[in-house]
Amino acid sequence: MRLTINGDFFETSGTRTLEELLNELDIEPGRVAVEVNLSIVKKADYPAFMLNEGDKIEIVNFVGGG
Amino acid sequence: MKFTKDQLQRYSRHIILPEVGEQGQMKLLKSRVLIVGAGGLGSPVGYYLSAAGVGTIAMVDDDVVDLSNLQRQIAHCTGTLGMPKVESAKITFESLNPDVHIIPIKERLTKHNILDLIKDYDIVADCSDNYATRFLVNDACVLAKKPLVTGAIFKFEGQLTAVIPHEGPCYRCLFEEPPPPGILPSPQGVGLLGVIPGVIGTLQAAEILKLIIGRGSVLKGELLIYDAMKPSFRKVKVPKNPDCPICSDHPTITELIDYS
């Protein structure tokens, strides 16, 4: 499946859900906020959130320093 | 109130801009901004707001200047080591511009003092270094309907956005709640390129100046992310969460929470 992640094309390897995508990218879900096609996805929904061909995904680091 | 001869000269590069002019400069001199945190981000935010002639700036921070701060916290210097950061910043900013009144508040923000502290200010800048304060400041600004310009930094990256309560999304619309303890390394433990707070804090100051002057569009509903390593600037649209626990029309948070 081809996705756009943070503006760049990305070809997944068998990933179906948002949680699987974060696993594939080796991203800890607690460290980011994720938006799919301009909607923020709640963390609790990551395991069941199905991705579709062409989805535009933004992964934003949860940054706290000052 | 009229400008003095010195003020006309000091602010001449503002005053000749049609978008600012004498009227905009007068707004700056009469405005009141509260900066949460007098460290990496608070330094450039306070520095540029002082240079611009923002008349009253309160700085809230309960920490003292440490040698390890000076690689990035440009409000402080070797001569103010050991001094409360808010006092050190007051010396720096008031020596830059005597028009500016810096109010040093050497306290930690809590759910008990924050609403009382922000009520006298027009705009709040979040320059804090921890998640608990970030959520507290966001929630308090939503409840008090205060515009908030929030910035955050980590290693080689920084981000900022403006929260205009009830006009756009808030910090909680993007980040639901503070991360569980231990998931994220503390910023103190991982390092930070010294210039990152300079980039992000300066952008925060630009948003604050535009909010005061009332010109241009403000970075609301968008998160601007800077990555020094690529290098790139990226804007992410942030939609308002219709079920946001604090800024939706059916909030589930009705009183402030101390996560710390």
Image (spheres, coloured by chain):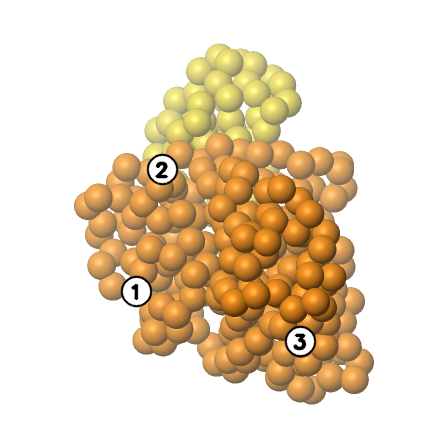
Q: Is mark 3 on a helix, strand or loop?
A: loop
Q: Seen from this angle, which residue lies furthest left? A: B250
Between residue B239 and residue B145, name the one nearer to us: B145
Answer few, some or many: residues within 10 Å of disc 3's Cα (few below 14, many 20 plus, some between 14 and 19).
Answer: few
Residue B240, label in figure: 2
What is the letter of the orange chain?
Answer: B
Q: Are marks 3 and 2 in contact (CB under 8 Å)?
A: no
Q: Is there a contact, CB below 8 Å, between mark 1 and mark 2?
A: no
Work out how far the residue at label 1 is from the one at label 2, CA to CA, in angstroms.
20 Å
Residue B102 seen by the camera: yes
Same subunit, tags 3 and 2:
yes
Q: Position of residue B86 (x, y in %)?
A: 60, 78
Q: Which of marks 3 and 2 is in front?
A: 3
Please report the residue visible at 32 percent of the width from the left and 60 percent of the height from the top: B144
Whether residue B254 sits left or right of residue A64 in the image: it is left
Picture residue at 57% right of the left edge, 76% below the top: B101
Location of residue B173 in the rendering, given as x and y in whole percent from the top left corner: 38, 43
Q: Marks 3 and 1, how far apart in space?
A: 36 Å
Which residue position is annotated with label 3? Answer: B98
Residue bearing mark 1:
B256
| Element class at badge 1 | loop
Say above or below: B102 vs B71: below
Closer to the N terminus: mark 3 or mark 1?
Answer: 3
**Chain bearing mark 1:** B
Q: Nearer the viewer, mark 3 or mark 1?
A: 3
Q: Residue drawn at (28%, 37%), measured in percent from left and top?
A: B242
- Mark 1, residues whose alpha carbon is within 10 Å: few (<14), some, or many (≥20)? some
